[in-house]
Image (cartoon, rainbow, N blue to C red):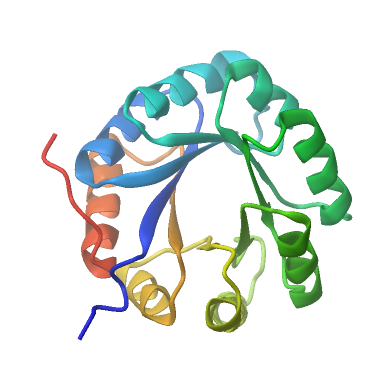
Amino acid sequence: MTDPRASCQLYAVIEAGPGASERLSAALSAAGLACVLVAAAAGRPLDAAAAKPLVDQAKQAGVAALVLEDAQLARILGADGVHLCAMKDPQAAYREARELLGNGSVVGVDAGISRHAAMLLAEAGADYVGFGAPVHLKDRDKARARRDDLVSWWAQIFQVPCVAFDVGTPGESEYLAAEGVDFIAVTLPAELSPAAAGDMVRDIARAIGASETTR
């Protein structure tokens, strides 16, 4: 029987700032990554100076590099695309980003908790939709259950890839991979040491059956 996790891949979210390059290097060495999303550290803006080294590092490793929210910055840096989230009108944000970046770039969108929005985004041409359990939600069990339900529903019906965000443990990863999610997003925050970042990525790679590296 084919392992249902076999097609699931890793998507790393790296917070820019001091030590980010070392965390990303550890992640790249721990497992095969499909994508790196460059995000701002909490309370800091994401600017070209902070994002460019990480975009370049990912691309040099042969990994798709995306920038969080800012399609203009993604274009300036030569990133592979943008990830959009936290929007009142995700369809409008998607259209603006697609017009700016063109069809050759990746535009992925966090669909929030709206099934309707997710379907509209997929129909509009989004390269993937994301579902998460944002850390600001106090009821973590409810948030994760809602994310898991959306992922399961999407994987059973739609061809457009799905990314599961805010995944904290190998156990969560294994469950979501078995449900058919295409990508597991592993967040590597600014406070995480390079060694811990590598261990986290390696553990989740093992849980979902993704390839580890020995670089």
Q: Is residue 144 above or below residue 168?
A: below
Q: Residue at x 42, y 39 (%)?
A: 191
Quarter of the image where one finds residue 198: top left
Q: Nearer the viewer, residue 100 or 130?
A: 100
Q: Residue at x 46, y 17 (%)?
A: 53
Quarter of the image where one finds residue 81: top right
Horizontal arrangement in the rendering, residue 116 relative to residue 46 (left or right) = right
Q: Residue at x 57, y 13 (%)?
A: 49
Q: Is residue 39 visible?
A: no
Q: Is residue 24 above or below residue 7?
A: above
The residue at the far front in this view is: 103
Q: Nearer the viewer, residue 124 or 163?
A: 124
Quarter of the image where one finds residue 70: top right
* Image spot of residue 75 (x, y percent): 67, 22
Q: Residue at x 76, y 60 (%)?
A: 121
Q: Is residue 152 above or below residue 92?
A: below
Horizontal arrangement in the rendering, residue 215 relative to residue 98 (left or right) = left
Instruction: Specify the quadrant that holds the C terminus.
Output: top left
The residue at the far top in this view is: 49
Q: Is residue 167 visible?
A: yes
* Image spot of residue 130 (x, y percent): 61, 61
* Image spot of residue 204 (x, y percent): 29, 61
Instruction: Specify the quadrant that holds the N terminus.
Output: bottom left
